[in-house]
Structure formats: C-alpha cells, structure tokens
Amino acid sequence: MASQRAAGAASAADPVPADLTAPPLARRMACWCYEGVLLFAVVFIAGWLFSALGQVRDAMDARRPLLQAFLFVVFGIYFTWFWTKGQTLAMKTWKIRIVDTAGRRLGQPRALLRYVCSWLWFLPPLALLAAWHATPAQTGLVLTGWVALWALASRLHPQRQFWHDALAGTRLIRAGT
C-alpha cells in the first residue's frame, strides 16, 4: 500500500521539460516589465496593511525603513511562493516557466536564493546612487542603463540565462505554445 502511494506520488511529479531553451530576451524583458506593473498591487495592499496596522499618518514617518523591510519580505514571499509553483502571473502571460538547472520545479530554498540574487537588478546602481546623491533624472538614467546592461549580459551566458539565475541554479524556459 505504501509503495503504491510512493509510486503514485512519483508519477504525479511534473515531468522534466524536453526543451530547456531560454525564451527570447525581448519576451523575458516584457515579462519583467509586466511583473513590475503587477507589483504595484502588491505594494499598494502591503503598504495599506502596514500603514493601517502601524497607525502611520505621515509619508515621512520615521518607520519608513520598517516599511521597506516589510515590502522586501512581502516581495520575497510573493516570488518564492509563485516560483515554487513554476510561474508568476506575468510568467503565465508571457509563457515562461522557472525551473532548476535539471528542469525540475524549484523548492523553497532555491526560490529564496533566486529572490536574493535577483536584487542584482537593482542593488549595484542603488548603492552607486546613494553615494553620488543623484538627481531624479540621473537616478532614472543610471537605473535604466544598469537594467539594460544586466539584461544584455545574458547574451554572454552559454544558455542565455540571466546571471542571477546562473548564481541561483535556476533557469527560465519556454512554457509550451
């Protein structure tokens, strides 16, 4: 009986995709932009919850760093939960899946590692801008330039994966037609 359950669980596992090719860069970046749009809703709800529970009445409240830390955790929960399922809503829309390097579904630890590594999209330019005391126009230019360079650097990876995926042992693949 137990062996039948174990065999049934193994057969119910997701099959490893035959094609582990990365989607085109344009599709991955369109998905990235759409994900940013969807995150507005996540930020709105999380910000409202933080403000309501914390009795925040002023945008310049001294607890602003706590809000940022709270959002970091909320984003981590959002992404790791969806990535362990294989796709976020934006990834479903753009027919992209996330798997480990062997083509299997991600576990919580690997999804969390990818979340931390994905901050390479933003942390290097933000660290530079913090030291530079840049204007909003300079900030936009530096962030846009870094994102473009980081995305184009995927062309240097043998499987055309983003470098944070290589660091985390994950890969983006095409999710069916």
Image (cartoon, grey):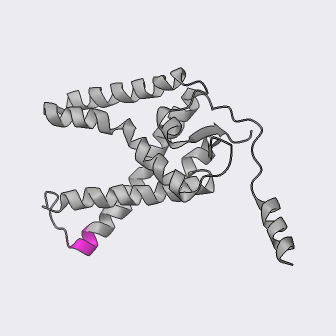
Query: Could you tell me which residue is drawn at 68 percent across and 42 percent down?
Result: 102
* Secondary structure, magenta segment, majority class: helix
**Left or right: 33 as drawn, with respect to 59:** right
First to last magenta residue range? 51-55
Q: Position of residue 54 (x, y in %)?
A: 23, 72
Quadrant in which the C terminus is drawn: top right
- Taking the image as shown, residue 43 lies to the left or right of residue 177, namely left
* Quarter of the figure with the N terminus: bottom right
- Left or right: where does residue 67 sit relative to residue 81? left
Up/down of 51 relative to 44, above or below: below
Q: In the image shown, does 7 or 97 lie closer to the viewer?
A: 7
State which quadrant residue 84 falls in: bottom right
* Closer to us: 147 or 14: 14
Quadrant of the rendered image containing residue 145:
top left
Residue 131 picture location, percent across and down: 15, 34
Task: Name the spot of residue 163 as percent of width and height, x first.
Answer: 48, 32
Q: Nearer the viewer, residue 32 or 15?
A: 15
Q: Give the farthest residue toward the front.
A: 3
